């Protein structure tokens, strides 16, 4: 017993209603986030300023009382720490000085990662101290494949053709980049746990662009290696995997030896997940973020449908992807009410 509904759920305990937190729960849909955000021009500088990162991490907890907080940071702090140039352009999202040649991998180094990301760990230390005991604190990292997508494309992409072409045509050199990222992510997550993160989530946001065999090699295998590496240093830390848009290949990630929970996107049916995933592993998800924009009866119906399918087993309520900026905060409050008031035999 550790007093956290979220952590106890990950450890296999059941409650009358599931714990809830939302990916991207800190962000532009909250006026109080926009106010703090407006005080720093550069997004990365904002991430590296502990008092601001702590404040925006706590904002959604104060407002909605979620069962878990996720430290305010970004997956792209890892390429930044490795020495690749990363910046965020207003209204356009992340930009990186793209890797175009394997020779450039040699310039990346994880030697300074811990020092470089010290402000993130400081923010975790302060957030953990400020949070109520029953609220768990999540650390996170991008999965190697998703990080490689941004590092090779230099931004988001429609089809990630550059990164895929590199992985398919030159698997040896792509493998070297993935190996570096596996080691870097283990370091980064391990540092977060040492600073006070109670659990961690791995975001493989672009896993879904890979066909099945490549998915095994470039998404699942690196995630399993990260889990093993992290558990060597922190044997009991819960790890949540989020391989987005992989469809029925989610079955491959049903690995309770590596992951404590599997976060599913909106494309996976709650009924299928209850039958195929939940008997083996705790499931997290999977409300469509746009339902939170719609609100009202549509939100209520869909949230209850998910609860009716998944609420009887090991389950953490979440979205299928992150909260979008146009979400009315009242709808988030409505969702928390629906989840906390759900009764298994209601419908
Ligand atoms: O969930 C949280 O509340 C914690 C903070 C968090 C952010 N990014 C803050 C952020 C987390 C967990 C992330 C993860 C992240 N970052 C992912 C994986 C999850 C996913 O969405 O698939 C990815 C792919 C990124 C990379 C990234 N960062 C993109 C593509 C963008 C631009 C898109 C956008 O929404 O603008 C960012 C910027 C970013 N990261 C913002 C926030 C709140 C918005 C920028 C701002 O506020 O100025």
Image (spheres, rainbow, N blue to C red):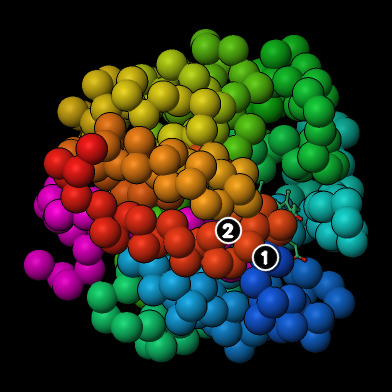
In this rendering, position of residue 136 left or right of residue 52: left
Determine whether the residue tagged by mark 2 lies in a helix, strand or loop.
Answer: loop
Q: Main secondary structure of the magenta part?
A: loop
- The mark closer to the camera, 1 or 2, is 1
Residue under the image location 44 percent in, 72 percent down? 64
Residue under the image location 48 percent in, 56 percent down? 22
The answer to which of marks 1 and 2 sits earlier in the sequence is 2
Q: What residue is shown with label 1? A: 29
Residue under the image location 73 percent in, 20 percent down? 164
Quadrant showing the N terminus: bottom left
In this rendering, position of residue 143 left or right of residue 234: right
Q: Quadrant of residue 46?
A: bottom right
Residue span colored magenta? 1-27
Residue under the image location 15 percent in, 41 percent down? 345
Does the magenta run of residues contain 86?
no
In percent of width and height, residue 300 lies at 43, 47
Is residue 215 shown to the viewer in this render? Answer: yes
Marking on residue 127: none
In percent of width and height, residue 288 lies at 54, 40
Residue lying farthest front?
A: 297
Mark 2 Cα shell of 10 Å, populated few (<14), some (14-19), many (≥20) = some
In percent of width and height, residue 107 lies at 78, 49
Determine whether the residue tagged by mark 1 lies in a helix, strand or loop.
Answer: loop
Residue 266 to residue 80: above or below: above
Instruction: State whether label 2 is within 8 Å of ligand 1.
Output: yes
Q: Quadrant of residue 194?
A: bottom left
Looking at the rendering, the quadrant in which ligand 1 lies is: bottom right
Cα distance between the residues tagged 1 and 2: 10 Å
Q: What residue is shown with label 2? A: 24
Q: Nearer the viewer, residue 253 or 194?
A: 253
């Amino acid at each position: 017993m550790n007093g956290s509904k979220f952590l106890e759920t990950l450890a296999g305990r059941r409650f009358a209603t599931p714990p809830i937190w939302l990916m991207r729960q800190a962000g532009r849909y909250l006026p109080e986030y926009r106010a703090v955000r407006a005080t720093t021009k550069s997004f990365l500088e904002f991430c590296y300023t502990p008092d601001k990162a702590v404040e925006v991490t706590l904002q959604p907890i104060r407002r909605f009382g979620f069962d878990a907080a996720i430290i305010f940071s970004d997956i792209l702090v890892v390429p930044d720490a490795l020495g690749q140039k990363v910046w965020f352009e207003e209204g356009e999202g992340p930009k990186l000085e793209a890797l175009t040649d394997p020779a450039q991998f040699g310039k990346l180094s994880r030697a300074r990662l811990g020092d470089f990301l010290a402000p993130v760990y400081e923010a975790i230390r302060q957030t953990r101290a400020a949070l109520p005991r029953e609220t768990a604190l999540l650390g996170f990292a991008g999965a190697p494949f998703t990080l490689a997508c941004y590092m090779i494309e230099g931004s988001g992409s429609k089809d990630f053709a550059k990164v895929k072409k590199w992985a398919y045509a030159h698997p040896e050199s792509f493998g070297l980049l993935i190996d570096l990222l596996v080691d870097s992510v283990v370091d980064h997550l391990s540092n977060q746990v040492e600073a006070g993160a109670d659990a961690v989530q791995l975001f493989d946001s672009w896993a879904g662009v890979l066909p099945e065999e490549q998915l095994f090699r470039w998404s699942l295998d690196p995630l399993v290696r990260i889990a093993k590496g992290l558990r060597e240093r922190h044997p009991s830390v819960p790890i949540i995997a989020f391989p987005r848009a992989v469809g029925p290949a989610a079955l491959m990630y049903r690995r309770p030896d590596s992951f404590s929970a599997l976060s599913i996107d909106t494309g996976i049916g709650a009924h299928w997940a209850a039958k195929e995933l939940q008997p083996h592993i705790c499931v997290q998800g999977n409300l469509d973020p746009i339902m939170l924009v719609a609100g009202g009866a549509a939100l209520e119906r869909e949230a209850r449908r998910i609860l009716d399918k998944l609420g009887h087993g090991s389950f953490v309520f979440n979205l299928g992807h992150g909260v979008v900026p146009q979400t009315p905060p009242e709808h988030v409050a409505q969702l928390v009410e629906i989840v906390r008031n759900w009764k298994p035999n209601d419908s």
